[in-house]
Image (cartoon, rainbow, N blue to C red):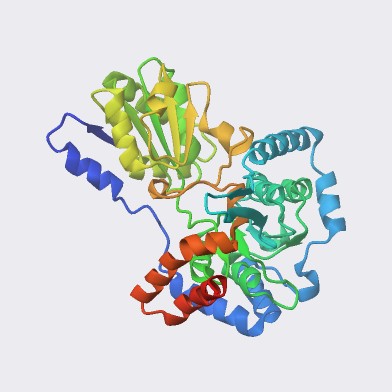
Amino acid sequence: MPIFLDSTAADFERRFADLLTMKREDAPDVDEAVAAIIADVRARGDAAVCELTARFDRLEMTPARMRITGDEIATAAASVTPEDRAALETAAARIRAYHERQMPRDESWTDETGATLGWRWGPVDAAGLYVPGGLASYPSSVLMNAIPARVAGVGRLVMCVPTPDDVVNPLVLLAAQVSGIDEVYRIGGAQAVAAMAYGTDTIAPVDKITGPGNAYVAAAKRRVFGRVGIDMIAGPSEILVIADGDNDPDWIAVDLLSQAEHDESAQSILLTDDATFGERVARAVEARLETLERRAIAGASWRDFGAIVTVRDLSEAAALSNRIAPEHLELAVADPEALAAEITHAGAIFLGQWTPEAIGDYVGGPNHVLPTARSARFSSGLSVMDFLKRTTLARMTPESLRAIGPAAMRLATSESLEAHGLSVSARLARLNR
């Protein structure tokens, strides 16, 4: 059974604080191992990648076989059923349309001194997309990472996907084809992250790496940050549902299980102003767990990290939600827009009982790569902006330099940076002859 909390209880604050600080990452200390892997790839390149692939993915690898060829991708894509292809293409079209609206505008203006100021946006040259393989194989993640990069105008898209025992999901390769990925490599783990960051004879380095992965991938992304950009360090999945009593408890139960089935360390929380409804949802979850295909995983997640919290009212639910800063937030209430106005921290918000979080995972349009572990307090989900850089522009005229230059000279003097001041004063001296 999950944890049951009541905001009116005397010990609520302590128990809620414990809920916020639960350690859900069920990974060993892998940083030392990852550091060794990265160092090996940097030193030996392709040879290290091939040896590590054989060790971890049970796949004998050579540099010549590392890249999945266009013919292999086409053959795999052709094996996908028409129904699955249509669903994938529907998702791709909606994701593309949503992200096209995110493209920012260049700006330029002339201020009152005559100086021209502004900025321009441009894409990174190359992006590396990590896609999980094996049991956790998600073609939707290919679309969510590649399409924003392509919309941003990234010139070269590289995808690494592990293929344990030489098995690959055809839908993943079709998604790569639909998204316009340029290069696909059958490698994974920390060695794939290192190869994309530092390059090998076979894989040219990229400028930014995005995409989810296991603890080794997360640790590798953390270590290569600075050499390349990364999107985020993602933790286990999570969902928070705020629901009133005017809901089908089974709907809310399967919404909670939709994240619990990802990982035994995932977390599903219900906040409700109706204690009886919370109990009905708990019973509905237990009933669903009797038949759910991934019931062992979902059951462990719900048992160890699930929670049902009874609150005084929906405003209190919103306040508690802001403290949780969930990855996914469903507002299954009569007026979701009004409640959403009270939400300040959430990766993605799903408005109303007809908007299950699973729509966002696949075909809604917004990105499903979202901040976890309360990082929605300070970060956002993946977007076109992750693949763009902003360059500022400034042009002085003699008049504008005369107007603002003395202030620059004064500040340079205050910082004891003589050459800074001289670079301005030398020009002003010419103007004042």
Above or below, 373 against 394 in this view is above
Q: Residue furthest front?
A: 433
Q: Residue furthest bottom?
A: 43
Residue drawn at x 58%, y 31% is 359
Above or below, 380 against 29 in this view is above
Above or below, 222 against 101 in this view is below
What is the tally of numbered marks visible in this picture?
0
User: In the rendered image, is residue 290 in sight?
Assistant: no
Residue 30, picture quadrant: bottom left
Residue 414 appears at what percent x and percent y? 34, 73
Residue drawn at x 58%, y 64% is 398
Q: Depth check: 231 or 297 in front?
A: 231
Residue 239 appears at what percent x and percent y? 43, 38
Q: Is residue 270 left or right of residue 217?
A: left
Residue 365 appears at what percent x and percent y? 62, 35
Residue 280, picture quadrant: top left
Q: Residue furthest left?
A: 10
User: In the rendered image, is residue 275 in sight?
Assistant: yes
For the C terminus, the quadrant is bottom right
For the N terminus, the quadrant is top left
Q: Residue furthest right?
A: 71
Q: Is residue 306 left or right of residue 401?
A: left
Residue drawn at x 44%, y 18% is 248
Q: Is residue 193 left or right of residue 244?
A: right
